[in-house]
Image: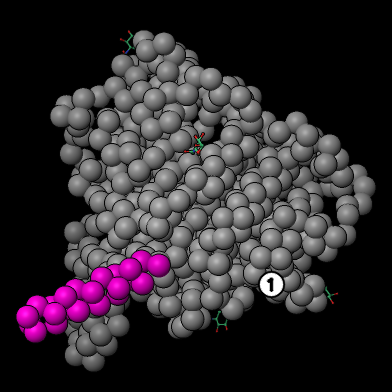
Amino acid sequence: MFKLSICCLQLLITCVCVISQDVEKPNIVFIMADDLGWDDVSFHGSDQIMTPNIDVIAYQGVMLQQYYTDTQGTPTRSALFTGKYPMRLGTQSDSISATEDRGIPITERLLPEYLKELGYETHLVGKWHVGKSRAHYLPTNRGFDTFYGFLDGAVDYYTYNLVETCNGSSFYGLNMYENLEPIEDLNGHLTEVLTDRAVSLIRNHTSTAPLYLHVSHAAPHAGGGLVSLQPPVETIAEQSHIAHTARRLYAGLVSSLDKSVGHIVAALAEKEILKNTLIVFVSDNGAAGLSQNFGSNLPLRGLKSTPWEGAARAVAVVWHPTISHRISNAIFHVTDWFPTLITAAGGNPSNKIDGLDQWATIIKAEQPKRNDVLITIDDLNGWAAFREGDFKIIVGNVTKEKSKYHGKELMALKHDVLPYETVLLESEACLVFKETLDLPLNIEEVYEQRNSSKLAGSDDIPEEVVCFPTFVKGCLFNVTRDPLEAYDLWHAKMDIVRRMSLRLRSLWTEMYPRPTLRGDPRADPAKQNYVWFSWVPNDEEMYEPRKPVPPFPLQVSRDELQYVVDINLNTFRDKLQDYIKNMGESFLKSVGGLFNF
Ligand SMILES: *[C@@H]1O[C@H](CO)[C@@H](O)[C@H](O)[C@H]1NC(C)=O
Ligand SMILES: *[C@@H]1O[C@H](CO)[C@@H](O)[C@H](O)[C@H]1NC(C)=O
Ligand SMILES: *[C@@H]1O[C@H](CO)[C@@H](O)[C@H](O)[C@H]1NC(C)=O
Ligand SMILES: *[C@@H]1O[C@H](CO)[C@@H](O)[C@H](O)[C@H]1NC(C)=O
Ligand SMILES: *[C@@H]1O[C@H](CO)[C@@H](O)[C@H](O)[C@H]1NC(C)=O
C-alpha cells in the first residue's frame, strides 16, 4: 500500500512535470521571406520601402546582423530543415526545378519531424521547394501535420500557376495544394491568401500542444508564371514616392509581406499566446536584383546565387518575450536554427550536424558558439566561400554580371515619404506590443538601434569592384571591417589565405557532388489536368550516375604546398599540436584533402 502510494505520487509528480514542461514550450512562428534584399527593410536604415511591422520585431528582439544563409532557395531551405550543409546532401547550388527528380534525401529526418516528436503541432504555409518529384518528399510525409501552399520555386501570385521550360517546351499548371489536394477554387493575392491561412491556424489552435507554424512566403520573389512583379494592386499607390517603375511594384510586394507579419502578430496576441511565442523573421537569401525582382542588397556586394555577402548575408530578426532587445554581431548560420529550435522546444539536438545550438546566445546573450561558417560550396557553378573569424575567402570563377554593387538606380525618390516614426508607431505590430505586452517603442532608442544597424562603409559604396576571383587567386576580405568586400587582402595576409584555403579544400572533398540538372518530360502537368504532381514512384531507382568530386576551383600554389611541408617537417611538433588543438579533425582532413587533389 505504502509502496503503491509512493509510486502514485511519483507518477503524479512525473505527470505534473511533463505538463508544466509542455506549458513552457514556446510556440514557434517561423516566417521566411523569399529573395528579400538587405536594403529592403526599413530597420536597416532605408526610408524608401517601409517595413514597420518587421522593424518592430527587430527593435523589440534581436537583430542578427551576421546571419548567413546559402545563396539560393533550395540549399538554404535544405540547411534549415536538416541542420546540415547542403553540399553534404546534393542540395547545393541551383534550386530544384519543377521537372527535376531531386529532394532532401529521405534518409534525413527534418526539423518538423523532431518538433512533432517533442509534442508540437506542425504546419507549413507557403513554399516548400526541397523536393516533390516523389510522394515521399512531400511536406506531409516529412513531419508537417498540415500543408497549404506550393511545392516548387515560385507561382503566379494570382493564378498560383507555375511555368517552366523542359526540353524546349513550356510546361504549365497549378501548383497550390491543401495537404495532397490541389486547390482549384482560390481567390486573391498569394501573400494575403497565405496570411489568411496562417491567421486561421492560429485562431483555430485550441489544443494544449505548442504550435510550430512555418510561414514561407513567396514574396518578394518574382512571380512563377510569365508576369514578374505582382503586388496587391492597392499597395502600389502607397509606393508612389518611388521613381523606378519596377521598384515601385517590388515595394508593394514587400509592403504586403510586412502587413502579413503585422496580422500574424495580432492574431497571436488575440489568441493570448504571443507572450509564449518565439517569432523568427528571415530571408532565404539576398535579392535577385534588377533582372528579376528589383530588390536591393546594398551596401552589400553581389546578387542572389553568387558567393558574395549580398547573396548570403540575409535579413534576420528573432523575438521572444524573455529577450532583452539588442543588435547581435554573432556569426549565425541557417543550419543553426535546427539545433537552436530543438533546444527551445526542450529536446536534445544531435551533434552530428553542422548547425550549432545558439539558443543561449539568443536568449541570454551568451558568448556566440560559432567562429566559422561554410557559406557555400557550389560545384555546379564552380565556386566556394568560407568565413572564419573576421575573414572571408572566396574562390572560383564567379559570374561578373552579378558581382557588383547593384541597385543604386532603384533608389530615386519622386517625393518625400512620411516620417519614419509616424509609420512605425501606427503599425499593427507596434500597437499590439504596446497594448498586449506593455512593450511600447522608445523612439530615441529606435533611432539609435537603426543607426547602429548600418554596416561599416555603407555611406561610401565603391563605384567599381576590385577583386574578382580566378583559378589562380581568390579574394580575401576582413568582413568585420569591410562587409562591402571592397579591400582585397589576398596578398597582404598570405598566412590567413593558406590556412583558410586549406580548410575550404578539405570541406570541398566532403561534398556529395551535385547531379547536373536533368528535366523529366514525364513531369508535364498537361497530362494531369494542368496540375503539377509528384510523378516518380518512390521506389524507382534514382538517376544519379556517380560523379567524382570536381577539382577545387583554385590551383594549389607552391606557397600552399610549402606551408604543408613546413608544418610537417620544420615545426612538426609545436605547430601540428597547435593546429590539431585548434582545428581538430578538420586540419587532418585538410592535409588529406590537399593530397587527394
Ligand atoms: C525532347 O524533345 C525532342 C524534340 O521534341 C524529342 O525528340 C525528345 O524525345 C525529347 N526528350 C525527352 C527526354 O523526352
Ligand atoms: C478554422 O476553423 C474554421 C471554423 O471551424 C474552419 O472553417 C477553418 O477551415 C479552419 N481553418 C483551418 C486553417 O483549419
Ligand atoms: C568563367 O566563367 C565564364 C562564364 O561565367 C566563362 O565565360 C569563362 O570562360 C570562365 N573562365 C574560366 C577561366 O573558365
Ligand atoms: C543617427 O545618425 C545620424 C547621421 O548618421 C545622426 O545625425 C543622428 O544624430 C544619429 N541618431 C542617433 C539617435 O544616434
Ligand atoms: C578586422 O577588422 C576589425 C574591425 O576593424 C579589426 O578589429 C580586426 O583586428 C581585423 N582583424 C584582423 C585579424 O586584422
Question: On the picture, is 306 further left or further right than 465?
Answer: left
User: x, y percentage for residue 198?
Assistant: 53, 44
* Kind of residue at disc 1: Asp
Whether residue 554 is visible here, answered yes or no, is no
| Image coordinates for residue 304, horizontal then vertical, percent | 54, 47
Q: Is residue 154 left or right of residue 457?
A: left
- Judged left or right of residue 454, residue 366 is left
Dot 1, how many residues are within 10 Å of its Cα: few (below 14), some (14-19), or many (20+)?
few
* Residue 5 part of the magenta segment: yes
Which residue is at a point 63% across and 28% down the rendered structure image? Answer: 188
The magenta region covers 1-23
Q: Say which residue appears at 92% left-offset and 47% top-offset.
A: 415
Taking the magenta stretch, the answer to whether it contains residue 286 is no
Q: Nearer the viewer, residue 96 or 336?
A: 336
Judge whether 583 appears above or below 340 on screen.
Answer: below
Q: Answer above or below: position of 6 versus 547.
A: below
Measuring from the top left, give residue 429's x and y in whole percent. Answer: 69, 58
Q: In the picture shown, does residue 243 fall above or below 270?
A: above
* Image quadrant assignment for residue 434: bottom right
